[in-house]
Image (cartoon, rainbow, N blue to C red):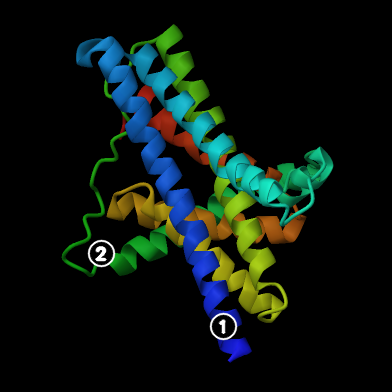
Amino acid sequence: MTKKRGVGELILTIVGMCIWVFAVVIATQLVIGYIMLSLLGKSQFNQPVWTSVYSAVVYILALIITVFVPLLIQNKRKKKKIETPAEMRKELGLDGLPTWTDVGLGPIGFIASLLLAALLVFIFSKFPWFVADQTQDLAFSVMSPGFNRVLAFLTLVVVAPIAEEIIFRGWLYGKLREKLNGKLSEIWGIIISSFIASFVFGLVHLQWNVGVNVFALSIVLCAMREITGTIYAGMLTHIIKNGVAFYLIYVIGVI
């Protein structure tokens, strides 16, 4: 009975963490969007400057809420000792500074994620409900050169990858590995944690084709955290991916 209860509690904890991340990311978008629409009006809100501000605020606020609210609740209930900044950084995969290994793995991870994404898209394309060429709504439909483009670049290529890596490969994947540690063999703990974190990452993008692509990316990024012990290489891979997409969409307009 105790063993069954332990397994049930573990499953509920994992489901709760996944729901927490999904709810925070989606709710943050809705709440910040509603507030800014109310204050600015639709026409003003759709301007590139305010779209960039909206996206940056959403990413940063989602990161803060996801990571720090559970910590505050745990400390208030005294279920866990107060962590030092160094301990928090280590838990999030931010221990130390980026290394040359991280730099070298960044482009390799990008290529690996493209290959895995291509394989998954090929498989899913066999299903009638999967639309491989569906356009992703990035909320930057109007983009002019200069300051607007710089803001969009900073949001999509810098802020978004850093925030998403800390939330999904730092906090969520790290917590999943911690919960499964000792319950399963190391390899199964890595596989299940990677799959769950990647599934939630794909789910929050709310589109089948985008979800499959970012699921593949996340699988590679989780593996890179296991290899290096940090999320720095994953951040670089994510930045490269978003940077290439930004160049193709907003600079030369081929997508």
- For the residues labelled 1 and 2, the Cα–Cα distance comes to 41 Å
Asked whether, in this view, residue 87 is left or right of residue 8, the answer is right
Q: Position of residue 234 (x, y in %)?
A: 63, 47
Q: Which residue is mark 2?
A: 125
Residue 11 or 155: which is nearer the viewer?
11
Mark 1 = which residue?
Answer: 5
Residue sitting nearer the eye, 52 or 107: 52
| Any part of residue 110 in sight | yes
- Residue at horizontal 32 percent and vertical 34 percent from the top: 30
Q: Position of residue 147 (x, y in %)?
A: 45, 7
Identity of the residue furthest to the bottom in this view: 1
Mark 1 touches mark 2? (CB < 8 Å): no
Residue 172 x/y as whole percent: 58, 54
Q: Quadrant of the C terminus?
A: top left
User: At label 2, which amino acid type do we have?
Assistant: Ser
Earlier sequence position, callout 1 versus callout 2: 1
User: Label 2 neighbourhood size at 10 Å, few (<14), some (14-19), many (20+)?
Assistant: some
Secondary structure beneath dot 2 equals: loop
Q: Secondary structure at mark 1?
A: helix
The answer to whether residue 98 is above or below residue 210 is above
Q: Which mark is residue 236?
A: none
Q: Mark yes or no: residue 115 visible.
A: no
Residue 50 position (above or below residue 17): above
- CA neighbours of label 1 inside 10 A, class few (<14), some (14 to 19), many (20+): few
* 247 to the left or right of 206: right
